[in-house]
Amino acid sequence: MVMSSRIAKRKENADSFMTAGHKIGFGISAASMTATWIWASSMYASVNSGYLYGISGPIHYGFWGALMILFIYPFGKRIREVAPQAHTLAEVMFARHGRSSQFMLAGSNILGSVISLTSNFIAGGALISMLSPFSFIQGVIVIAAGVLLYTLWSGFRASVLTDFAQVLAMLGAVIIIVPSMFFFLGGVDLFTTGAQNLTPQQQSFFSSDAFLNQGAPYIAAVLAYAIGNQTIAQRLFAVREDLIRPTFITATIGYGATIIGIGMVGVLALYAGIDPVDGDPNNVLPQVAAEYLPGVLVAVFFIMIIGSLSSTADSDLSAMSSIAMSDLYGQGLRGRGKVPNPRVMLIVGRITMILATAAALIFANIRFNILDLLVFVGALWGALVFPVIASFYWKKVTNSAFTVSVLVALAVFLPTRFGLVPDSGVLAYAVEALAVVGVGVVLGLMVFGFFGLKPAFAVAVVAALASAPFVLGFLRDYDTLTASLVAYAVSTIVCVAMSYRSSMDFDFDEIALATADYDTDAVAQELADAEADAQDTTQNKNDDDDDVVRV
């Protein structure tokens, strides 16, 4: 609240409210990217992974999540190249394709941000109810009100500047908390006395259970999450274009170290034979903190969790407000040849924050498994990854190819994800064959960003052929991983098939013109001229009325 009050302006700028003027420096942008990627749910989920899968669980969770930040930056550089003043990825898709692709990205981001906001409120409410006399609902309300109040006036500017303080608090807390928990749980002797509490898979650094249930699904899910998520895209559009690379590299290191470190608390709890409250592994982190840490360190732990959930919650609020301001209001008027009013945009953004907070408060009464939630949302975005990336490089991608490929991919993904596909027969093998293609697509996209099309295609083919013997007849038992790979494969196949014979030759220069800033001197002058014309019209009408002889 103090930081927000210091940066607040009497008259906020609409573009600064959404992207801070596209000129954030290295330190603030790297801290903001790190803080946004580290959310309370990711801390809980990493501990959850350590408790369920043992030593390699947090490593799979943190390492692949960190690596995905690194894989964003080459695509991010291309996106900023064609849309240097954009505010949302959906806005860019509207300029590239039209309403349907914009609606898909905007709608999926609103859904994802509401779920993210809800799970962060759940994490905060659970923490407060466990460490204080307040109830879960009271804790959720306090967290929601606090985040909303400091973000409401300055939007993204408040979010990105408070992220700097929050990431310092989180990193400092992790450095203190994890060694302290190791000491209070028994120290080095814990690995001897508690070894019987672990299965061979949980003791293995190369656990196949951890890879198939945690690592592999997370590779696919987080790549999708990174490409399609507005909270990440917003920071991409905000940072100075020449600082994209160092920002993402720094965030990669910061995220990996923090999340893997805190995830080891779950491993320690597993060695100590701790049974989670209500049998829910999501409770392990606050439970261990409450039972084994002294009061001062409980306060440090509290700061760490509040900082992590606040940094992501304010990012979600800023993301949804930007979507409402730009995609629902701004581009809606621009598409009809009208000039959006920046003052109205700010009102739309702030109302959106209030409504989003109210919706998340309602949904917070429903308890989700955070780990499954993260993978599910990321996998939904998997259907969008290839069409979005291809739209920035390939001139032949059409709106119909984009739309149809995403819809077909979702239609195949949903029954696969929820186990509705038979485990035997031709259909099961067909789904696994698509998963083989998905393996090639995921690895090919990773290589493409750094090395180009030919190396990416070679890696994709080799990866698909090499994985086929291990996938066919085996992967059907892992619905989450299979569904994620199928989403990638189907969207890629359909998008390529429909675009290959297309006659479209899109001019990427059009995107920059269609995604320019809203709150500029030129816009202000245009709105002033329009208002003056309206007043002249009204005055002339009144003068005409005065000349009328009334009986």
Image (spheres, helix red, strand yellow):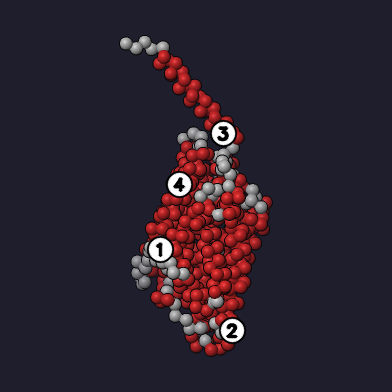
Query: Residue 351 has which mark?
Result: 4
Q: Is residue 548 left or right of residue 331?
A: left
Q: Quadrant of residue 370?
A: bottom left
Q: CA distance from mark 2 to mark 3?
A: 64 Å
Q: CA distance from mark 4 to mark 3?
A: 23 Å
Rendered position, 95 above or below 32: above
Circle 2 crowding by C-alpha within 10 Å: few under 14, some 14–19, many from 20 = few
> Which mark is first along the chain, 1 or 3?
1
Which amino acid lies under the numbered mark 1 shown in the image of this protein?
Answer: Ile
* Residue at 59 percent of width and 77 percent of height: 180
Which amino acid lies under the numbered mark 3 shown in the image of this protein?
Answer: Ala
Residue wearing tag 3: 524
Rendered position, 261 above or below 510: below
Q: Considering the numbered disc 1 on the image, is that residue within a helix, a strand or a loop?
A: helix
Query: Residue 404 has which mark?
Result: none
Query: Residue 137 has which mark?
Result: 1
Q: CA distance from mark 2 to mark 1?
A: 36 Å
> Which mark is first along the chain, 1 or 2?
1
> Which mark is first along the chain, 3 or 2?
2
Residue wearing tag 2: 187
Q: Quadrant of residue 171?
A: bottom right
> Which mark is first along the chain, 4 or 2?
2
* Residue at 38 percent of width and 68 percent of height: 428
Q: CA distance from mark 2 to mark 4?
A: 51 Å
Give the farthest residue toward the left.
551
Which amino acid lies under the numbered mark 2 shown in the image of this protein?
Answer: Gly
Which amino acid lies under the numbered mark 4 shown in the image of this protein?
Answer: Ile
Q: Considering the numbered disc 2 on the image, is that residue within a helix, a strand or a loop?
A: helix
Residue 189 in view here:
yes
The front one of 139 and 463 is 139
